[in-house]
Amino acid sequence: MGSFSIWHWLIVLVVVLLLFGRGKIPELMGDVAKGIKSFKKGMTDEDTTTADKGVDGKTVEHKSDEVR
């Protein structure tokens, strides 16, 4: 009950192949890879943009008017 037999995995594989077809799975994986590359490029572009602006990362402390 806890693990699946080889027959379960074969049935799942057949259903996936029927739904997506042979050509769709590589296309889907290629799109996922392009998305990951684009995300990484965007993250590095963001880091270089903040470094170019001269942002030094100082924090501003808020002083409240509340009396204790």
Image (spheres, rainbow, N blue to C red):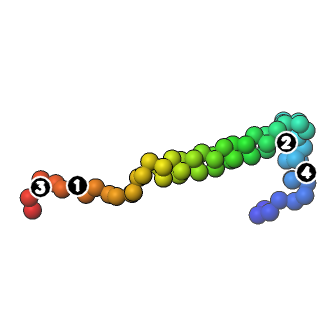
According to the image, label 2 marks what residue? 26
Residue at image mark 1: 62
Image location (x, y in percent) of residue 24: 84, 36
Residue 28 drawn above or below residue 54: above
Amino acid, disc 4 = Leu
Q: Nearer the viewer, residue 59 or 56?
A: 56
Q: Residue at x 9, y 62 (%)?
A: 68
Helix, strand or loop for disc 3: loop
The structure residue drawn at horizontal position 25% and vertical position 57%, both measured from the top left corner, is: 61
What kind of element bears circle 4? helix
- Judged left or right of residue 66, residue 49 is right
Could you say which disc has been placed on residue 10 in the image?
A: 4
Tell me, yes or no, whether the two marked residues, 4 and 1, touch with CB atoms within 8 Å: no
The quarter holding residue 4 reads bottom right
User: Measured from the top left, where is residue 21 in percent x and y?
Assistant: 88, 36
Which residue is disc 3 drawn over? 66
* Viewer-nearest of discs 4 and 1: 1
Nearer to us in this view, 51 or 11:
51
Q: Nearer the viewer, residue 17 or 68?
A: 68
Specify whether residue 3 is in view. Answer: yes
Nearer to us of marks 3 and 4 is: 3
Judged from the image, the secondary structure of the residue bearing numbered disc 1 is: loop
Q: Are marks 3 and 2 in contact (CB under 8 Å)?
A: no
- Calculate the distance from the C-alpha at mark 3 to the C-alpha at mark 1: 11 Å
Residue at point 59%, 51% (across, down): 44
| Relative image position of residue 46 (x, y in whole percent) | 53, 47
Q: Is residue 2 left or right of residue 52?
A: right
CA separation, marks 3 and 4?
Answer: 67 Å
Looking at the rendered structure, the secondary structure element under dot 2 is helix
Q: Is residue 18 visible?
A: no
